[in-house]
Amino acid sequence: MRLETLYDNQIVPETIAQHSIVTSLLNRDLASLDKENFIIFPQQVSQSADLDSDKLIFQSRNGKTWTGNIVGVLSDGEDELAIHSRFTNQLTKDDFFLRYMLQRVLHYNVTENKLASSSQQSYYDLLVFLFPYYLNKAVGKGLYKEYVKQQYNDTNVKGAIDISQQIRSNIPFVGKVAYRTREFRYDNPLTQLVRHTIEKIQKEYPFLLQENKKSRENVRLLRQETASYSPLKRLDVLQENLLNPVRHSYFEAYSSLQRICIQILSEEKAGFGNDDQQVHGIVIDVAWLWEEYIDKVTGWKHYGRKRDLATMHLFKQPKSSPRYPDFVDKGIPIDTKYKRKIDTRNDYNQLTTYLHILSEIPAEKRRGGFLQPTDDWHSKAQGYEKIGTLSGLGGELFTYRFYIPQTAESYELFVEEIHKIEKRLKETFN
C-alpha cells in the first residue's frame, strides 16, 4: 500500500511516524544502511561532505520526527513510503527539480522521454534512471570475472575427467575425452545478470543507454563478453545472483550494481534474503545532488575529499588540517546548503574560517556566503542578501537564495524558467 507522500526537511505526521518503516530507520545515517538492502545515491556515502546529522533519513528532534536531506522510496514488502523534494510542483505533483538535477549531474536528456512525462516517479523508474550511473561506475574498474565451471569434450584435456559423460559420449572411443574444469571468465552469473538488465531496459527505455559514449561502450562490451546469454535463462540467472551476493570489498561497485539489477529484473522491491518485512529502498542524498548541480551550472572551483577536487589547508607549514568549502569563486568561499535554515553557530563558524584562510583578499572585498534553494517567489526572498559584517578582520557574510520555479505546468516550461534563474546566479557573481 502506498502511504502518504512525505517531503524533505519537514515534520512527519504522527500517523506515519509510528509506522515500522519510519521507526526502523529513525536516527540511522546512510553509512549504517550502506551494507543493507538499500541502493544509495551517490554510491560512496563519503562523497557527501555535509555533517552526519544531515545524512539521516528520519531524525527525532524536540519530540517530533523529521525528514532530512534524503529523498527516495522505502518499502517493507507491504507498504511503500515516498519522500519527495520539498520543491515538488504542488499543481502537477511532479518533482521537476529532482529530475532536473539528476539530468544535469548524470548528463541525461530527460526532456523528451517517458520518465519526464510520468506524473509520479515510481520506485522502478528511479532504479532504471540510475542504472547507467552504477553500470559505468562498476565497469570503469574493469569487467567483472570469476571462476566458472565448464564442461568440454575434446582432445585437449586440462581438467578432471567426467567419467559418466565419457561413457555416454565417447564409447566406442574416438579420440575425444569428456572433462570438467574451472576457468576465469567474463561470462559469469553476475555479468549475465547485468546483460539481462541491459536488454530489459533497452526495450522499455531505449534512449537511456544511448545518452553518452561511456554507457554505449560499456553496453557493447557486456554484450560482447556474454556470449551464453539467452532470454529464457533470466529467472535462473536472477535466482543464482540472489543466492550469491557479491561480498568482497574490492568489488563494492559490482555489489551495488548487482543489487540494482536484481530489483529491476524483479520489478519489485526485492532484497537479498527471505525476510519480506525488512525495510529496503532507493534513496538519494539530495544535498550532495544540489552541490553537484551547482558545480555543473557555475564552473566555480570545487573543493572536496575526492582526488580531483581542491583542498584548503588551515596551516601553512606543514600543510595539514584540510578544510573543504564547497566552492571558491574569485576569492569568495561559497557553501551550498540544501537544508531550510542556516546553523548560526556551526555554519557561520565554518564560513568565517574559510574567510580567514583567504585573508589575502583586501578586507573591503572579503566576503563569503551560502547558496540556498528557495520556493518563495517574493522578490525580497530571492537573490543576494547580506547577513552582516564580521568583527575583527572584517569581511561580509551573505546568503544567495536560488529560486526553484513552482508554477510550471510541464517539465519543458520548468527547464525554461530555471535556465533564467541559473543565468541570474552567474551574472550576480560575474
Image: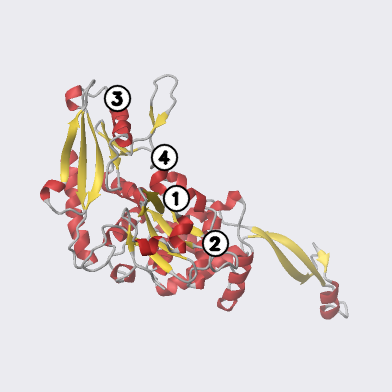
The amino acid type of the residue labelled 4 equals Asp
The amino acid type of the residue labelled 1 equals Asn
Q: Nearer the viewer, residue 262 or 215?
A: 262
| Number of numbered markers | 4
Q: Which label belongs to residue 258?
A: 2
Mark closer to the chain start, 3 or 1: 1
Quadrant in the picture for residue 124: bottom left
Mark closer to the chain start, 1 or 4: 1
Measure the alpha-carbon separation of dots 3 and 1: 34 Å
Please state the horizontal and vertical placement of residue 336, each as a whole percent of the image.
29, 43
What is the residue that sits farthest to the left in this orientation? 379
In this rendering, would 284 be left or right of 254? left
Residue that carries the numbered disc 3 in the rendered image:
356
Q: Which label belongs to residue 308?
A: 4
Few, some or many residues within 10 Å of mark 4 (<14, 14–19, 20+): few
The amino acid type of the residue labelled 2 equals Gln
Determine contact: label 1, label 4, CB under 8 Å.
no
